[in-house]
Structures are given as C-alpha cells and as structure tokens.
Image (tube, grey):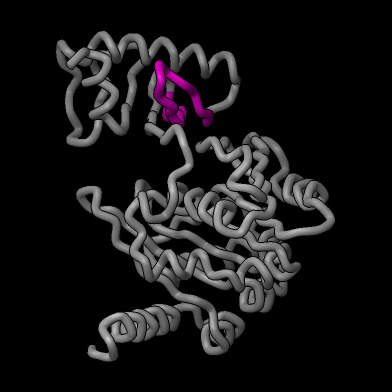
Amino acid sequence: MTNTQFSHDAINDWHLDTAQPELSVIFPGMQRINEETYPEAVELARATKGAHEEMGRDSFVMTFREYRYRVQWMRENRYALRKLRSYVPDLEEIGVPRMYRNLLLDPVLSREGGLILVSGPTGAGKSTTAVATVGSRLRKYGGYCLTVEDPPEFPLEGFYGDSGYCEQLDVEHQKNYQQKLVDALRCFPSEGTSMLFFGEVRDPSAAAELCRIAVDGHLVIATIHANSISAAVQRALALASHDGESEAKCLLSIGLKLVVFQQRERNILSMSALPTDVEVASIIRRGEVQMLEGAADMWQRRLMMARNGGKA
C-alpha cells in the first residue's frame, strides 16, 4: 500500500496545524502524526492554507488529490478537515433502515410539500442523510431541486434518472440567508415538483423563512444540530421566534412533516423519527415541545409492533 492510500483512505478527519504539521491529529482514533503520515500532513497543510488565502472564507470545500474535504478554520494555523463523499449516495447505501427510508421517500411529500428536519449531534452524518434523501427522491420521483448551502459539501448538481435535476447555490457566511432563500424561490420552475435543500439551520432569519416556505407547497429538507427530536423542534422554534416570527409555532405545526434524529457510535447509525400528525401538530402549536419525546417513543413502539406483526 502506498503512503497516499494509507494516509487518505483510512482517515476521515484531520485537525491540521499548518505551522507545525507534526502537531496535527488524525481521526478516527486521535492518532499522532508519524513518519508515514508526516509527508501527507505537510502537503495537505500547504494546500489547505493556500485554499484559505485564495477563497478568503473560513468554511469551504477543497479537493486534495482525488479526495474532497470540508474545511473549517479553527484558529490561526489550525484547521479541521472532514473527508466528503465524491458522489451522492442513496439511503440504503448509507445504512438507513427500510422503515425510515419509507418515511423519507413518502410520495405524499411530493404532492403536499412541507419540512423534513434531519437532526443529530456533530459528526452524526446529518448532511449525508439529507443529501441521500434529495438524491433518492430525485431518482424515484423526478422533479427539480435547488440547494442553498454554505458551502456545498456534496456534488448534487446534475441530472437524476430521466426527469430529476438539481442545482446548487453557494452562500457565504456574510450573505443574507433570508434574502438568499427568497431569491431561491424565484428560481423554481413554474410547473412540476420542486424541492429546496437547505444546509444547516443555524441562522434566525433562515429558520423563520424556512417555516414560511414549508407551508407554501414546496418540500424543504434541512439539517439542524440537536441532541433529540424535541430539541430539534425547540431549536427551530427558538431561532424562528428570535427573528420576530410571531407565528412560528403555528407555521411549524402546519409545515413540519417529519423529524429524524440520528447518531453514530463506532460508525454504526442509529435513528428515530417522528412524523407529524394531528396530535403532534397540536403539541407544537401549544409550544409544549417537551411532550414530543413521549410522542416519538409511542410512534416508535407502534412502528416496531407493525414490523413485528403486532407483537411488542
């Protein structure tokens, strides 16, 4: 095995020190740089610092050799790099169980629209699940998808099957997210099924605008950092309300169609989900979001019983 293959095929993350590459750390395993990885650390550090200076932004995607990395500037001379897939996987390939694939690929969502929130902690693979959902829906149902991302992490743009197509918009941190979302809606074709994929919801104006868009008939897929289903909904509401959207509870109770929570431990994916029904919508409208965990547990039990032929 060559040094390049070892350094990149087996490593998911680099925390690079561009001034002293020997102080960098590689993951998984929080490994020190050794004689085998030092030459690669030096070259990758040089490429990363050069890309940062050229792009003039603290979060970006770069290609090094045949690999794509999402780069985040941490502090002077320190960068966090996450290896990205070079293609758009489908839901089955990334290990999403059938019962959750069925929820994410529900054909009703194409007709009625609404908001799908994919939530989880850092490193849970939220973006991968969301992107796989977009790709899988385009392959299965066709239609048009526009993405608003900062920065685009996966090569989503292009044709899918006979009748699916996606275009990507790159939005920098300093841009107005709300205005970019409004601009994105003007790009939708006048007819046909349309999807909007929004990277991570972390901006109040974006959260408020997504709540409004979700009730307009478009299918919106977004990720949000949270440690539970109820926390995901609470955060979306808090962000939207912070922007002055007084009807955030009402809008989200109508527009939210599905919340997925996922986490990874030792690279094993575990998921839970909560589709929105009349009861869930009522809980959100009343602002009693803490009750959603009980609703999610109850739905999960029903799902497992149905899968097991009615046996608990």
Q: Quadrant of the N terminus?
A: top left
Let me know if residue 287 appears in the view: no
The location of residue 138, given as percent across then percent down, is 59, 53
Please identify the quarter of the rendering in which residue 33 is found.
top left
Left or right for 9, reference 94: left
Q: Residue at x 41, y 71 (%)?
A: 273
Question: Foreground: 177 or 164?
Answer: 164
Span highlighted in magenta in the image? 59-75
- Magenta-drawn stretch contains 197: no
On the image, the x and y values in percent for residue 201 come to 56, 53
Please tell me whether the stretch drawn in magenta is mainly helix, strand or loop.
Answer: strand
In this rendering, the answer to whether 288 lies above or below 61 is below
Residue 28 higher or lower than 160, as above or below: above
Q: Quadrant of residue 157?
A: top right
Camera-nearest residue between 117 and 88: 88
Question: Who's the residue at 48% across and 42% down the image?
Answer: 88
Quadrant for the C terminus in the image: bottom left
Residue at 44% across, 80% down = 292
- Does 63 appear in magenta? yes
Please state the horizontal and vertical placement of residue 222, each as a whole percent of the image.
56, 56
Q: Is residue 21 visible?
A: yes
Name the side, left or right, on which 159 lies relative to 73.
right
Camera-side residue: 89 or 178?
89
